């Protein structure tokens, strides 16, 4: 499978852990992801992601 733009894959726990900071920045702080909010993520769901990150971004 080709690696998408910027080489970021979020297909496994390892990927999520590796890119936690970027996930937080893109989906919680800047809200630029999901692109065009095609998946209709809610502010509540963004807040849950924020709590996940602030609690250490655990993946296990
Ligand atoms: C909550 C869901 C999502 C998360 C956490 C997420 C996260 C990310 C991250 C961390 C990057 C790397 C950007 C950077 O570090 O500069 C990225 C890039 C990108 N994502 Fe997402 N993404 C999500 C949903 C989506 C969806 C639904 C699409 C498409 C419909 C999408 C399309 C893209 C594209 C095209 C890029 C490359 C952007 C660029 O080159 O500047 N993402 N995403």
Image (cartoon, grey):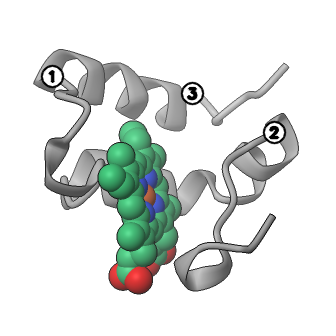
In the image, residue 28 above or below residue 54: below
Tell me which numbered mark, 3 or 2, is placed earlier along the sequence: 2
- Dividing the image into 4 quarters, which one contains the N terminus? bottom right
The residue at the far front in this view is 1
- Front disc: 3 or 2: 2
Q: Which mark is residue 12?
A: 2
Which residue sits at x=19%, y=53%?
31
| Callout 1 crowding tier (Cα within 10 Å): few <14, some 14–19, many ≥20 | few
Q: Nearer the viewer, residue 19 or 5?
A: 5
Q: Nearer the viewer, residue 5 or 55?
A: 5
| Callout 2 crowding tier (Cα within 10 Å): few <14, some 14–19, many ≥20 | few
Mark 2 lies on a secondary structure that is loop
Which residue sits at x=48%, y=35%?
54
Residue 44 locus on image (x, y percent): 18, 16
From the image, tell me which residue sits under label 1. 42
Q: CA distance from mark 3 to mark 1?
A: 20 Å
Residue 19 locus on image (x, y percent): 65, 59
From the image, tell me which residue sits under label 3. 55
């Amino acid at each position: 499978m080709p690696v998408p733009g910027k080489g970021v894959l979020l297909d496994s726990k390892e990927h999520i852990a590796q890119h936690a900071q970027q996930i937080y920045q893109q989906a919680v702080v800047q809200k630029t992801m999901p692109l065009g909010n095609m998946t209709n993520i809610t502010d509540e769901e963004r807040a849950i992601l924020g709590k996940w990150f602030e609690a250490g971004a655990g993946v296990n």
